[in-house]
Image: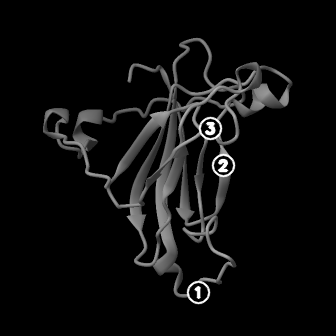
Amino acid sequence: DDSPHVEYWSRQEWKHIEAHADVDEALAAGGGPLRYPRHAHVLYLDVGSRVRGPTCVWEAGRGEDGRPPRFAGAMTVVPAVAGRVLRFDGSLQHAVPRPADVWLAPFVISQSGPPEDFGRSVVLFNCWPEAEAPPHEVQPDEPAAGVDAASIYRAAPRAQWRPADLS
């Protein structure tokens, strides 16, 4: 991805996240147009033994005034698996259900147990394509002085990557 800006944050718990699309929040709050990242990503770092916390992504559809409809169509369910990276169009609606069957169960049963069983450590990052405009009110990090980026990469070369079977 050749996007010049990457917005990132992390979450360390399996938390119910309602369906939404990522937007430039400050621009939208000020009454501006909805501006979406080019791509959204979820990097699953660590997943507790009792976590079934998938990321659910809905197909694109046509909404009013260029806005995506709340639920456009078919949903892809991507299970949380440590080491997996999920990448999707940044304008798509997505959610994280907790419990995983919350939308289908006749009633919700409380989940209890040690916190480490329910951990869902993820890094989330969005790529913004406009060189002159990172998300409003998001301050860029200063480059780390004296760090050789090549020395800290631990991923296999891209030529060795392979698609994951999500079935």
Q: Earlier in the sequence, mark 1 or mark 2?
A: 2
Viewer-proximal residue, 112 or 45?
112
Separation (CA) of disc 1 from disc 2: 24 Å
Residue that numbered label 2 is attached to: 19
- Specify the quadrant of the image occupied by residue 137: top right
* Tally of marks: 3
- Seen at 26% across and 51% down, the residue is 165
Classify residue 76 as left or right of residue 148: right
**Upstream in the sequence, badge 3 or badge 1?**
3
Q: Which residue lies under the disc numbered 3?
A: 72
Image quadrant holding the N terminus, namely top left
Q: Looking at the image, which residue is at 53% across and 63% down? A: 12
Q: Secondary structure at mark 1?
A: loop
- Three-letter amino acid code at disc 2? Ala
SS of the residue at dot 2?
strand
Label 3, label 1: how far apart the Cα atoms are:
34 Å
Q: Position of residue 56 (x, y in %)?
A: 52, 51
Q: In the rendered view, would you say 162 is above or below 44?
A: above
First in sequence: mark 2 vs mark 3: 2
Q: Nearer the viewer, mark 3 or mark 1?
A: 3
| Residue found 47% across the figure and 78% down from its top | 116
Q: Are marks 3 and 1 in contact (CB under 8 Å)?
A: no
What is the three-letter code of the residue carrying label 3?
Answer: Ala
Residue 29 in percent (x, y) is at 83, 31
Q: Is residue 16 above or below residue 62?
A: below
Q: Residue at x 47, y 20 (%)?
A: 4
Q: Callout 1, which amino acid?
A: Ser
- The residue carrying mark 1 is 112
Image x and y of residue 134, in percent: 61, 22
Q: Is residue 6 left or right of residue 21?
A: left
